[in-house]
Amino acid sequence: MRLRLKIWRQGSPQDRGAFHTYELDGCDPAMSVLELLDHLNAQLRVRGETPVAFESDCREGICGACGLTVDGRPHGWRDNLPACHQRVGERREGATITLEPLRTGVFPVLRDLVVDRGVLDEVTMAGGFASVDTGLAADADALPVAHDIAEYALDMAACIGCGACVAACPNGSAALYAGARVAHLAALPVPALERGRRARAMSVSVDEFFGSCSGYGECAKVCPAGIPLGVVGALGRERWGAFFHPTRS
Ligand code: SF4
Ligand code: FES
């Protein structure tokens, strides 16, 4: 399969950057977007050219490193799949595939397709960690958690921090990401002891860096972890809950 790749090349954060076009033979429809870049880079190395920089780690949909924009959409053509699971077979022989970094003001481009998503960590760190000193790890049975609540917390913990939700949002909102983080911790007995303080601190951080949510819903369509759209209100609910229930620390 022959494809044309239009790829954003940018040597450093200070560079203006531009699209470069590459003709690529020998592509397999079963290749992922990342394997397509591997295939291109192998040829660039043979020609003595600089390979395209991109991020990847697990290539199994669990680390979030592979966030990039494929044909104008964070992660790629199919809903709720990370770039490492988006297959080239979605496009026909001879098609042009455009690859660029996640496009949102809070993720500066470091090089080619690699962006700095550290601002997401700022939000999580603002929330802090469950700081209750529980001594040795308690027996799993010592703190009963209803099965459906444990399942819900696990579903929220599935967010892989890829940043696609922010890039997909016309407002650059991190409501889905932050909502998943607070909803996960508020559902569990020990982290919930600090739910009020956490929600207030994360709200300040989110307001500082990101736009507000207008309910477009683009975030949930691209989220590879399947975080549901209803979670965008979780941070606000937690913050107001702390306001009306002073017993929530
Ligand atoms: S909520 Fe979904 S799209 Fe947003 S960072 Fe988490 S996994 Fe990625
Ligand atoms: S490389 Fe880990 S989620 Fe894609």
Image (spheres, helix red, strand yellow):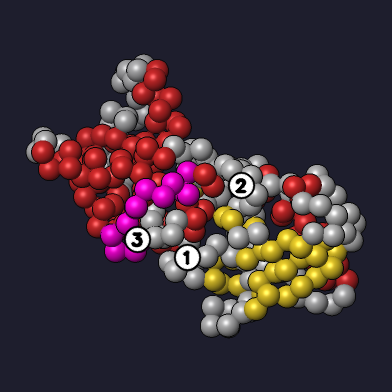
Position of 66 with respect to 52 (left or right) is left
Q: Which residue is mark 1?
A: 104
> For the residue labelled by badge 2, is the local secondary structure a helix, a strand or a loop?
loop
Look at discs 2 and 3 and give the one toward the viewer: 3
Residue 27 can be seen in this image:
no
Q: CA distance from mark 3 to mark 1?
A: 10 Å
First-in-chain label (1 vs 2): 2
> For the residue labelled by badge 3, is the local secondary structure a helix, a strand or a loop?
loop
Q: Which residue is mark 3?
A: 211
Looking at the image, residue 241 lies above or below residue 26? above
Q: CA distance from mark 2 to mark 3?
A: 23 Å
Please name the residue shown 21% across and 50% down the image.
200
Residue 209 within the segment the image draws in magenta: yes
Q: CA distance from mark 1 to mark 2?
A: 18 Å
Q: Position of residue 85 (x, y in %)?
A: 68, 44
Q: Amino acid at mark 1?
A: Thr
Please name the residue shown 56% across and 50% down the image.
64
Residue 82 is marked as: 2
Q: Amino acid at mark 3?
A: Gly
Position of 191 with respect to 106 (left or right) is left
